[in-house]
Image: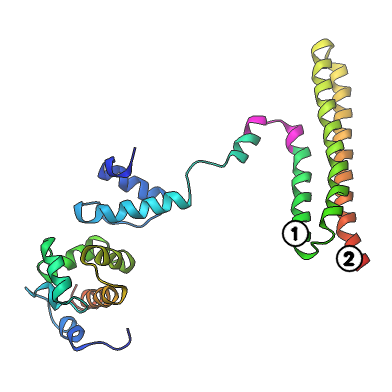
Amino acid sequence: MSTTTQKHRDFVGEPMGDKRVTALSGIGEILGEKLRQQGFDKAYVVLGQFLLLKKDPEMFTEWLKDASGANSRQAGVCTQCLREWCDAFL
Amino acid sequence: MSLSEKSDEEISKLLAEYGIKHGPIVDSTRKLYERKLEVAMENAPVEPSSDKTYYREEAEEITYITYSPVRQESDVLKRRGNIEPDEDEESDQETEAPVQIANRTANHSAVRSRELDRKSGGSVWKVIRLLLLAVLAAALYYAYCRVLKNEENPFNIQ
């Protein structure tokens, strides 16, 4: 996770506002759709879940894999993304 | 009984019991925590092992003290067994047999003392008690010597 994608930098670089769930790095259209079906349509809803789990990366990664079917890499990237966003804006 | 039937508060309490850090138990987090609890419960059951309860029920000085050297000895044997598996069987028989005898004598005298106590007065009981202590000390010393000898011997041979 030393190299970050453009998507990651875009997300972490500014408040998330009303961004869709697919704006999270690691979450593409397919995973985004699965999350949307469960009510996680906006990035801030996923952030809410991250915060409910007390920002515990292990628990959040596990949840994301479970809820969206993400693989370990995708879930890890997304967790990192939210963690850095929290460090910057919370 | 099952986790899914418990209330959010009960789940929260259980999580704390098993030392799992957790946030609020709500619809979106509950399933995750239930699974975490299940894993923790399988790995570390709350019930104490039957070994411990056995000693607690006995709660008798004599049995406790005479058992402990045997335990230590078997530990020593196990440890030594790892290093020298060839000699393990022989030394096992040599050491365990006498200690078991010592054990029996100690237990017998314990029974006898109790019987006498019921029949006669306190003065006799005092003497018996002293004798018992002496037997116990002898048994312990004997076991201790055995352990020492057994620790020395194999190294001397090699």
Provide the chain ID for the residue under circle 2: B
Q: Examine the image and state in which quarter residue A65 appears.
A: bottom left
Highlighted range, magenta? B56-64
- Which residue is identified by label 1? B79
Work out whether A45 lies above or below B120: below
Q: Please tell me whether mark 1 sits on a helix, a strand or a loop.
A: helix
The answer to which of marks 2 and 1 sits earlier in the sequence is: 1
Q: Is residue B63 magenta?
A: yes
Q: Main secondary structure of the magenta part?
A: helix
Residue at 89% across, 28% down: B131
Q: Position of residue A58 (x, y in %)?
A: 33, 67
User: In the image, is residue B43 part of the stretch drawn in magenta?
Assistant: no
The x and y percentages for residue B128 are 87, 23
Mark 1 neighbour class, 10 Å CA radius: few under 14, some 14 to 19, many 20 or more: few
The quadrant where residue A28 appears: bottom left
Q: Amino acid at mark 2?
A: Phe
The image quadrant where one finds the N terminus of chain A is bottom left
A2 or B125: nearer the viewer: A2
Indicate the position of residue B13 as horizontal and vertical percent values. 34, 45
| Co-location on one chain, circles 2 and 1 | yes
Q: Residue at x 21, y 66 (%)?
A: A68
Give the residue drawn at x 34%, y 37%.
B1
In the image, residue B49 sits, relative to residue B28, either above or below, namely: above
The amino acid sitting under disc 1 is: Arg
Residue at 78% x, 38% y: name it: B66
Residue with the most extreme left position? A18
- Res. A11 image quadrant: bottom left
Q: Position of residue B115 (x, y in %)?
A: 81, 16
Label 2: which secondary element: helix
Q: Mark 2 sits on what residue?
A: B155
